[in-house]
Image (tube, rainbow, N blue to C red):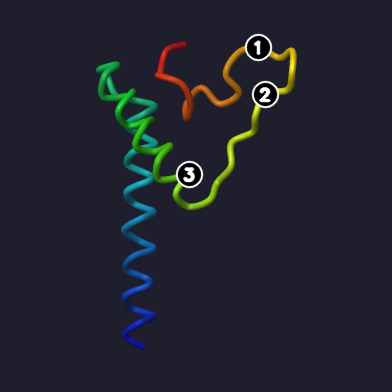
Amino acid sequence: MTIGLLSAAGVTLYTVTVSVLAFTSAFARRAGLRREARATLAVLLLARGAQTPRPRAGEGGDVMPCLGGDGRR
């Protein structure tokens, strides 16, 4: 039961962290803060095994601008 409780606490902490970073990356007033939140969010999501789609040959632009690149639009 202790393992389950620790696991639930870890999942809750991870979920709250990702949620706060997602809101920060979308709604922060300062561009630098949004950029840092996006970079941190990308690291956390890639560490969990999420895969971002790659552009096909001939397609330009960033497929997921909120998670990739240097934060410029």
User: Disc number at residue 60?
Assistant: 1
Q: Looking at the image, which residue is at 40% across and 40% down?
A: 43
Residue at 65 percent across and 29 percent down: it is 54
Q: Which amino acid does label 1 sit on?
A: Gly
Q: Is residue 53 above or below residue 45?
A: above
Q: Which mark sits nearer the N-terminus, 3 or 2?
A: 3
User: Crowding at label 1, few (<14), some or many (≥20) Cα neighbours within 10 Å?
Assistant: few
8 up-or-down from 56: above or below: below
61 with respect to 14 (left or right): right
- In percent of width and height, residue 41 lies at 39, 38
Query: Residue drawn at (34%, 25%), measured in percent from left and top?
Result: 27
Tags 1 and 3 touching, CB below 8 Å: no
Q: Which residue, given by chain and number where applicable, does mark 2 sit on?
A: 55
The x and y percentages for residue 48 are 48, 52
Q: In which quadrant of the rendered view does residue 71 lie?
A: top left
Which one is in front, 73 or 58?
58
Give neighbour class at mark 3: few <14, some 14-19, many 20+ (Cα, 10 Å).
few
User: Residue 51 falls in which quadrant of the image?
Assistant: top right
Asked whether the residues under the numbered discs 2 and 1 touch, taking CB atoms below 8 Å apart as contact, a structural biologist would say yes
Determine whether, in the image, residue 38 is placed left or right of residue 28: right
Spot occupied by residue 11 in the image (x, y as percentages of width and height): 39, 63
Residue at image location 26% in from the left, 19% down from the top:
32
User: Which type of secondary structure does the marked residue at label 3 adopt?
Assistant: helix
Is 42 situated above or below 34?
A: below
Mark pair 1, 3: CA separation: 22 Å
Kind of residue at badge 3: Leu
Hey, which quadrant is residue 24 in on the image?
top left
Q: Name the residue under label 3.
A: 46
